[in-house]
């Protein structure tokens, strides 16, 4: 059996990855370390709690003593690191928490992994050969795009919020452990995820929930900010490929190729709800525009050519299919009968 430490997997993306991995890899034991801050919810992972190959540990990735204990107690042979503070608005209000978790927490995990797996720089202990540290990052580290072009793995970093700056910093620390110590690490930078289990505060769940409740649907600025949307299970499949087959020290961008403005997103969701849960008036009448977010990046778009060509990854869902699955999941979550 291979023991893999997963961090932050009571959150959105990780809680989709855990059942996927347990089902696909019967020789894996998964240890999930999560502090259960506001974005973490054990309900997300309830389907796995009785699986003998899954263990949950509540704790902080910044707690070095705890991380060292887990590495020793469970003989950790791989890390997939999701845990992060990730809400941009919160990073604007309280940036220190983001630096602590995203930068210091990543450093703690890396340094413990290095000391556990390697005798010295570029010399791996025999029993840990093949051990890998996979760092999950974001396209926001690249900053913002104009009307054309896409983020590639060679795009210079230009983060614009405390959140994206903390993620860019953690990426650089990972890079330093690759270059200085020869630690086997890979980095993936993903576009905006959507799908089941996403936290209620995020754009798509907020649109669905507020529409169903008859509350205003808040949109920042003019609603023309553009994001590339990636269905969460497609992201998990990309993580799977990079963790197992990606080249040591490489970065891979994972994007859905589904660029939409926020207005297009809300229009699409309201149109689907008008069909599935019709009311006297369209849900589109609930749209309300708010003062724009500070430092709001205009456009993100990912070029996923590298992971497609090198590893054979391809998104199974387009936005039209993925958003229907997402809405159906939330209708069930909110107890709404179709």
Image (cartoon, grey):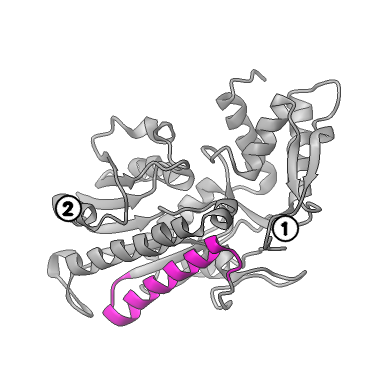
Q: Is residue 58 left or right of residue 163?
A: left
Percent x, y for residue 276?
Answer: 73, 25
Percent x, y for residue 281?
Answer: 86, 25
Give me the C-alpha separation between circle 1 and circle 2: 43 Å
Q: Specify the segment rendered in magenta.
A: 159-184
Q: Which residue is mark 2?
A: 69
Q: Quadrant of the C terminus?
A: top right
Circle 2 packing at 10 Å, graded few (<14), some (14-19), many (20+), is few
For image coordinates 33% across by 51% down, the residue present is: 6
Q: Is residue 144 left or right of residue 15?
A: right
Q: Any mark on residue 93, and which? A: none
Q: How many marks?
A: 2
Q: Any mark on residue 226, and which? A: 1
Up the image or down, 45 lies above or below 125; here it is above
Q: Secondary structure at mark 1?
A: strand
Along the line of sight, the residue nearer the viewer: 337 or 23: 337
């Amino acid at each position: 059996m291979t023991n893999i430490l997963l961090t932050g997997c009571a959150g959105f993306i990780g809680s989709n990855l855990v059942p996927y991995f347990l089902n696909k890899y019967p020789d894996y034991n998964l240890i999930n370390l999560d502090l259960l801050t506001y974005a973490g919810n054990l309900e997300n992972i309830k389907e796995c709690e009785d699986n003998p190959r899954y263990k949950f540990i509540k704790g902080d990735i910044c707690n070095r003593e705890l991380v060292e204990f887990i590495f020793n107690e469970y003989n950790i042979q791989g890390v997939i690191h999701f845990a992060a503070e990730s809400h941009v608005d919160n990073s604007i209000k309280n940036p220190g928490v983001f630096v602590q978790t995203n930068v210091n927490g990543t450093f703690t995990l890396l340094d413990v992994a290095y000391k556990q797996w390697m005798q010295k720089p570029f010399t791996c202990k025999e029993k840990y050969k093949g051990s890998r540290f996979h760092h999950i990052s974001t396209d926001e580290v690249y900053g913002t795009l104009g009307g054309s072009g896409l983020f590639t793995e060679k795009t210079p970093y230009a983060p614009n919020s405390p959140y994206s700056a903390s993620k860019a910093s953690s990426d650089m620390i990972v890079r330093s452990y690759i270059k200085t110590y020869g630690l086997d690490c890979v980095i993936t930078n993903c576009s905006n995820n959507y799908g089941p289990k996403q936290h209620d505060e995020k754009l798509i769940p907020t649109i669905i929930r507020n529409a169903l409740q008859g509350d205003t649907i808040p949109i920042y600025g003019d609603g023309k900010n553009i994001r590339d949307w990636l269905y969460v299970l497609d992201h998990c499949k990309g993580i799977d490929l990079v963790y197992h087959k990606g080249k040591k020290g490489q970065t891979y961008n994972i994007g859905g190729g589904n660029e939409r403005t926020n207005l297009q997103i809300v229009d699409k969701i309201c149109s689907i709800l008008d069909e599935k849960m019709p009311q006297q008036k369209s849900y589109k009448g609930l749209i309300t525009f708010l003062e724009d977010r500070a430092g709001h990046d205009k456009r993100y778009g990912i070029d996923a050519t590298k992971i497609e060509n090198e590893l054979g990854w391809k998104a199974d869902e387009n936005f039209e299919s993925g958003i229907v699955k997402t809405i159906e999941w939330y209708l069930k979550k909110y107890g709404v009968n179709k």
